[in-house]
Amino acid sequence: MHNKEPNDKYCFKCNMQFPIPKNNYSKRNILALVCLCCVLLLESFVFNLPFWQTLNAQEKDYPVDQASSSLSIGTGLSKQGNNLIISNTDKAYIDIHQQKDIRYLRLQSHNYQGINNITYTVSIQFDAGKQWHEGASRTFSPAISRSQYVNIGGTASSIRLHFIAAEGSVIPITKITLNPRVSFHISFVRLFIELALVLFIISLGPRSPLYHKKLSSIPDHQKIVIFSCITTIFLIIWIGICWLSGSTRYWTGIHPGPGGHIANFNQYDDLAKAILHGQVSLNLPVDKHLSSMSNPYDFALRSKMAENGATIYFDHAFYNGKYYSYFGVIPAILFFAPFRILTGAALPTAYAVLFCCLVATLFITILIIELAKHYGNDPSIGSILFAIIIFNIGSGIAYQAFTPSFYCVPQAASYMFTIAGLSFWLLSKKDKNNRFAISPLYAFLGTVCIALNLGCRPQFILSILLAVPIFWDSVFTHRTLFSHRGLAPTIAICSPIVLIFIPLFIYNYLRFGSILDFGSNYNLTGFDMTHSNQPLLSLLPLVFYYLFQPGSIIGYFPFVSLTNLPMLTWFPMEPSVGGIFMISPFLLIFVFMHWIKRRSTSSRQNLVIQADNTQPASLLSIDTTDLLISILSIIGIFILIVDAKTAGYAWRYHADFSWAFCTAAVLTLFQSKTMTQMPNEEKPSLLRVALITSAAFSFLYQFFALFAINRYGSLIDISPSHYYSVADWFLFLP
């Protein structure tokens, strides 16, 4: 034993001594203090800058029904009671002229029923010039007072507000206030986000000591507290996103659909009612015009009939004169039918999707801990926490929680079952006192979850291939599966496939006369899926859009806008904010990390083989971790291509394959020393800084993407009060 200084750390495993910086904890305290001071400054002086700018402002009110030299109304606006009516869109403006520059306006109005948002632009004149310089369009809501403030910037005294709406539209503005006083306002949601980022920087920043604390060195009760905290944070986030979207009010009932069709957001409840009545078809009225069509899948002809009064349901399977649901039946059996039995009412799809997201989040933590135990070299607590974060924000779950329509029900269910199934499979592998065994119960539950994917989102059934690398050593090394002593776990892991697949095959046969026909080709959607056949090479642009499409970042709220997705060959295309490597750039970093590792490993193996050709064949034995990463990558790419080929581009399809890429990224992380460097390092690695920065960027990018205009479930249309509450944070930006 050699002497140690009091402030040194001694490692008995490697017989080395590492100096611990004496000021380590004081530096952490200083960092925490600096971060909290930044939050205080942001809340007090940045986000509340309008309050300080208008603290001594002299307010002036100008009623719009009283003409003056300071305020004039264009000829395209006519007065009608307390409102202005647009009679000519080109001249629907209000001009304001002052001797002093104007910093803020307030468009005071009354809550006119039927109007959520009013779009307008702000134009300014410079000094004595007569030309108007127009900016980007803005919106405000008559019902939300904080949305009615307009930041002019204090650089012009002549302002024109040009209202953009169809002729006959109502503009319920009664008064315009110049240079109003803006009140001081603290947002608890904003404060939560700021504190979450502070916690992330302090706990998992580049110099965090958590990257040096091994999983095995932490007592079990501390592990429970740490992992429970990070999981709870994400549970709160998904609940908050679902609440923010106003989904429980919107994604339900009957709505007008494309081409005069009917959009039925209660399709899963209709399926549940059919099941409870012993039917496989939906009990929906079939219009005689639809039944008489020679090709009912022709969208143009259906639209003509629908516009002429025919009742036709959109995105329902139609076969042999009956409506069916081509969406997986398992969620209807597990969620919607029991809810209807217990309550007699329809289960809102938002609750079903949110439930799946929350359960999946719990299993994400379990899965990553198990991956760390089985495929990590005793990774650090910091790396595991970082893995939990990137899996949650990178796997597309945020989109599901934000737009929980019936489209997302099978996806969210399969996402949940896949994560749970992989977790149970890993939990089934026991290693106590070098006695390797398989738990029949966990193995059975794992296969049940994976097999249920066939009745939810069939693409996810490919996750069953992951059993090969997961149980590779159990089959070929320890002989605890597919052997005499492994008979019980073998039956447990195989039997659910038969028990679940056969009823689903019978269900398909009763509907469409084929056990493998899930009915997607009979969908009454925006194009003829039965006869559509796009060239394979036209998939290349779609693959680019899914993976590499850059986002569109703008300089004003919501800072993220929809991307342009042009195609020379027609495909169904839905709005998006970028490819998964834009939304989750850390995934691209992990791709390069794995590629570099593979090249390095291959070079070392070649050198060893060339140096000694007599080495046994075990040098080329299967690396199960590498095999698992490879299969995950293949599954993700295959599902991506299948989705693109059959249904074009949709943002929600990211969840079909992102989970596979995230799992591969976590495994790559656990194979790297980037997050587990020794405590005597003077500087954190550039790679660690890049990973942490990309994760923070992804969080903020996806947060602002929630407010993107014209996305599906656009907040400004569905829940304008929530949209403007956050838009008000950035009133200081002109």
Image (cartoon, rainbow, N blue to C red):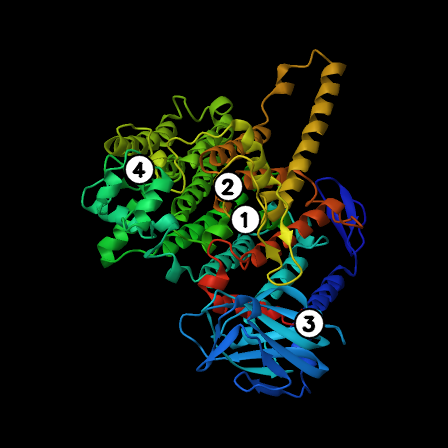
Q: Which mark is residue 124?
A: 3
Mark nearer the viewer, 3 or 2: 3
Disc 2 residue type (three-letter): Tyr
Residue drawn at x 74%, y 48% is: 10
The structure residue drawn at horizontal position 69% and vertical position 72%, both measured from the top left corner, is 124
Residue 487 position in % (x across, y down):
36, 25
The amino acid on which the numbered mark 1 sits, given as a three-letter code, is Ser
Give the mark, 1 or 4, whose residue is nearer the N terminus.
Answer: 4
Q: Are marks 2 and 1 in contact (CB under 8 Å)?
A: yes
Q: CA distance from mark 1 to mark 4?
A: 30 Å
- State the quadrant of the N terminus: top right
Q: Which is nearer the eye, 212 or 546?
A: 546
Circle number at residue 649: 2
The residue lying toward the viewer, choosing from 481 and 727, is 727
User: Do labels 1 and 3 touch, CB within 8 Å?
Assistant: no
Q: Amino acid at mark 3?
A: Ile
Tell me where residue 429 appears, x and y as whole percent: 47, 35
* Count of labels in the image: 4
Q: Position of residue 733 (x, y in %)?
A: 67, 69
The residue under label 4 is which amino acid type? Pro
Residue 44 in view of the camera:
no
For the C terminus, give its image quadrant: bottom right
Position in image of residue 644 (x %, y %): 50, 36
* Label 4 sits on residue: 296
